[in-house]
Amino acid sequence: MRRRLTYFILIGLVLGVITGWAINASIDDGTPAAAAQLAGIAGKLNILTTIFLHLIKMIIAPLVFSTLVTGIAHMGDTKALGRIGGRTLAWFVGASLVSLTLGLVLVTLLHPGSGLGLPLPAAAAGSGVDRSAFDLAKFVAHIFPESMIGAMAGNEILQIVIFSIFVGMAITSVGEKARPLVRAVEALAAVMLRITDFVMRFAPVAVFAAVAAALAERGPHILATYGFFIASFYLGLILLWTLLLTICFLVVGARTKLLVRLIRDPAVLAFSTASSEAAFPRTLEALEAAGVPPKIAGFVLPLGYSFNLDGSMMYMTFASLFIAQAYGIHLALGTQIAMLLTLMITSKGIAGVPRASLVVITATLSQFHIPEAGVLLILAVDHFLDMGRSATNVVGNAVASAVVARWEGELGAPAELETARALEAPAKN
């Protein structure tokens, strides 16, 4: 079923490209009326994508809560929690620095913003992105939930993670009395994963609609205009994938090949829908199938969605320096390093903030005296770039989970191999 779904998603992706291109070619004549008509068609197509993403978000909160609480409860003691948490955060910090630095080096070497030839927005113009969504004091206070129900209702991933950690630690300290609660939470996780199977049947339709809407409204010419910028960014993502998977192979070994095969489905889904959140349930299933214990997958993956968005972090350095190059602003090496460290801090916990990467980029630009209106230069292709960074976020978090499991010495036998052995056993008897 998983392999067929991947093929159906790819078919939906290809059909979406063809349909969107055809719609744009048949209507777009450069007039405002044609643009409005295309926007209307895209809006109708996006209804299907919105329905799918709403269904996925319906699953996220209870799934994050149940898997994280179960994972902590099965660790057995707070020492194990502290050790795994420390190793997880160490990987997150290292991966973040690699992603940000690779983006900085590539954009400095390739200069995609120089000589672009696009009309620059007025330096004093507004970006249209609400920077108030990222305020350090508000952000720190917002991490801690006022209400579990409110956090669940708003799909506030970071707040759900904090609450789940408290619940898991409390269950561990209570001991045997909390066993019924642990079984109930495990049952909730199983039910949520079954619901995921139902929802995922709609994924190919949602992928078709998302890609068709984007190309119908924007047209293929937007890709040509920003071709070098897009190609440079995707080159960076390819290098990042290669680096992450190489490190994974050095730590995990030959199991990396199985991991790559199993996360293909969620990565394709994240790429097609431009939403790493949409791939969360499938990524969790893929990790467990690859032999990552549920207690580690259920702990590392939800944290990764708040603290380990590798694709988004590379995009932030790439976009920030691209805008500076487009304005002809030279940034000294020290300034670039300061920008990298700033993004390193401000990129943490951005899950749940609408258009989070653009919010952080806008705040960073103003801090380094780069006109924030430069964000308008990348808005036109942000969706196409979001597709790549969403898939990268999935790969980065899958690698993090596998590496932490290996460090803990708990990377078990892949579920697929166990199933095969179970099927072969009766024949041998």
Image (cartoon, grey):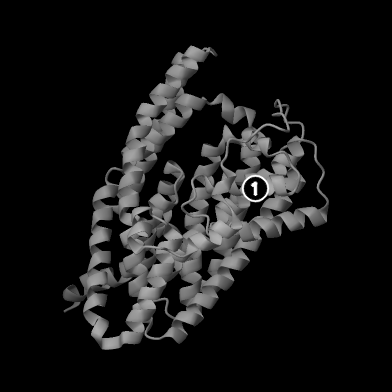
Closest to the observer: 180 or 291?
180
Q: Quadrant of residue 30?
A: top right
Residue drawn at x 58%, y 27% as measured from the top left: 222
Q: Where residue 322 sits: x, y (%)? A: 70, 41
Q: Relative to residue 275, is residue 26 depicted above or below?
A: above
Q: Where residue 385 sits: x, y (%)? A: 55, 41
Disc 1 is placed on an element classified as helix
Count of numbered circles on the image: 1
What residue does disc 1 label?
A: 363
Residue drawn at x 35%, y 50% as measured from the top left: 57
Closest to the observer: 414 or 297?
297
Say if residue 291 shows up in the picture.
Answer: no
Relative to residue 126, is residue 307 drawn left or right? left
Residue type highlighted by circle 1:
Ala
Closest to the observer: 193 or 144?
144
Q: Where residue 210 sits: x, y (%)? A: 41, 35
